[in-house]
Image (tube, grey):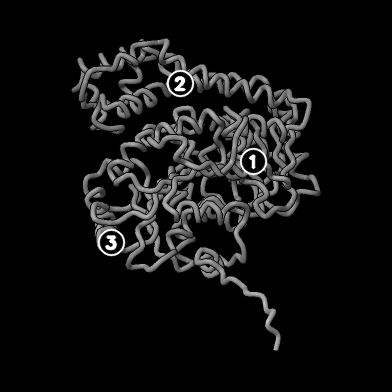
Amino acid sequence: MNNDLQTIEPPDESLLALRRYFGYEEFRGRQGDIIRHVMGGNHAMVIMPTGMGKSLCYQIPALLGERSEAGLVLVLSPLIALMQDQVQSLLKRGIDATFINSSLDRKEREHRYDGVAAGQYQLLYVTPERFRKAEFLEALSNRPLRLLAIDEAHCVSQWGHDFRPDYSRIQEIRELIGNPVTIALTATATQECRQDIYLQMGIPEKEIALFHQGIDRPNLSIEVAEAWGDESKLDCIEATLSRSEYLGGSVIIYFSLIKTLERFSDALFQRGVSHVCYHGDLPRRQRRQIQEQFMSGEVDIVLATNAFGMGVDKEDIRVVIHAETPGSIESYYQEIGRAGRDNQPSLCQWLYDQNDLMTQMQFIEWSNPDASFYSRLFTLMSEHEEECRAFGMEWMNDRLQRVSRHDHRLATAIAMLDRHGVIGGPHPPNCFEIQKSLPDDFLDDEFLSEKKQRDQQRLYGMVQFANESGDRKEFLNRYFLGDSVTA
């Protein structure tokens, strides 16, 4: 009889859940370490390349332990389409997940509130704006929370590339729900952005472990091709689409402006390149239809603004082309991350025309109203409240500026006034209700110029990236990693 048999430890509960629900035999990279860390009651910041499995780091914890005893995993997600796609995927795997957002009618929202209060759902996806609703907070009030997951955590930071005001209420949100264990996840956060995320969450840096898996995607080829005007770019696009090593998959071509996208669409159709177009001005139903056509493989090429991408988890995207200059390294890296999720060779090509920088500089101006604009807006709302209510935002915009009807400073200013409690909400009619005086910071151009300068520096980062003579992947590593220390 052989007494030297080796004792084999059984797989832990998280690994069993991975195999049962997701069909993977082993965790990838630091996933297992991250799950054990948060299940031990510890906060985590996770920086992981797009497509490398960040979501499993909070989805697996929702599946562990006895259902009757396990708390809810609450996920803050930035986009309705993103959370709907994730929930649909989880339901197909037999996981009890749901979302609550503005796409639901009142009856369905109330039904899901009742479900939350009654102990249903292992995972619940919401936008941070949902915490404005008293009935939502009431539904959560008696529900133990296992984990708060902040997806796309760069949105938390005022320096993050997708800043939105309600994401900067994270500390307040955490306090409302009892300061649960928190995991923040993103593919794109510089050292400076991470520091701001810690501050906005109200968690001291020493109390949150950083799991940084780097940003390298070995299967992606990164190219910057100089171009001069539309014809040069169209020639480059045609040549790239015919490259044999990247045939057989899908293609995303990104644009900054809808009018440029539409102009290129006409030209590409004339050249016999079949495609569909996706941008924020299309009706929601049409956007959804286009996304479904792309995901199913019914269409292979989509021309899109950056409204397209989050939630697009398609494995065989072989080519991502930026036909106009992105506003930052952060947004560029987020968008090229959609390529090659099947680990097959894929191309990320940026058609660099220096004239495109003017478009991004205009965006920066629109995203950073000065003190004079805030003062004029507050005066208009104070002295002409009835007219503002009656004639709306377009009327207000005409009286605040006459340079361009596409100037977005009003939308930016309204969002910021809402964030600081100056008005009653981000949308009509609440946005016309003044709650308090304009804070001094909004009358201080020196204070307001700080974020504008940061935005300009991030755009300059794209210029440096274009002019990089060495390894551009190494440039990205330096930009994002800095002197990071991983947990």
Which residue is depicted at the point 37% across and 44% down? 127
Under tag 2, what secondary structure?
helix
Query: For this view, does 218 lie left or right of residue 411?
Result: right
Local SS, label 1 = loop
Q: What residue type is disc 3 on?
A: Gly
Question: Residue 258, percent across and down?
Answer: 54, 32
Q: Could you say which is closer to the camera, residue 178 or residue 333?
A: 178
- Which residue is identified by label 3? 115
Task: Categorize mark 2 by other alpha carbons within 10 Å: few (<14), some (14-19), many (20+).
Answer: some
Residue placed at 50% from the left, 55% from the top? 35
Which percent across, then down, holds residue 340? 68, 49
Q: Are marks 3 and 2 in contact (CB under 8 Å)?
A: no
Residue 312 spot, x, y in % from top left: 55, 50
Rendered image quadrant of residue 187: top right
| Upstream in sequence: badge 1 or badge 3 | 3
Mark 2: which amino acid? Trp
Badge 1 crowding class, 10 Å Cα cut-off, few under 14, some 14 to 19, many 20 or more, is: many
**What residue is pinned by disc 2?**
366
Q: Is residue 263 visible?
A: no
Picture coordinates of residue 344 (x, y %)? 73, 53
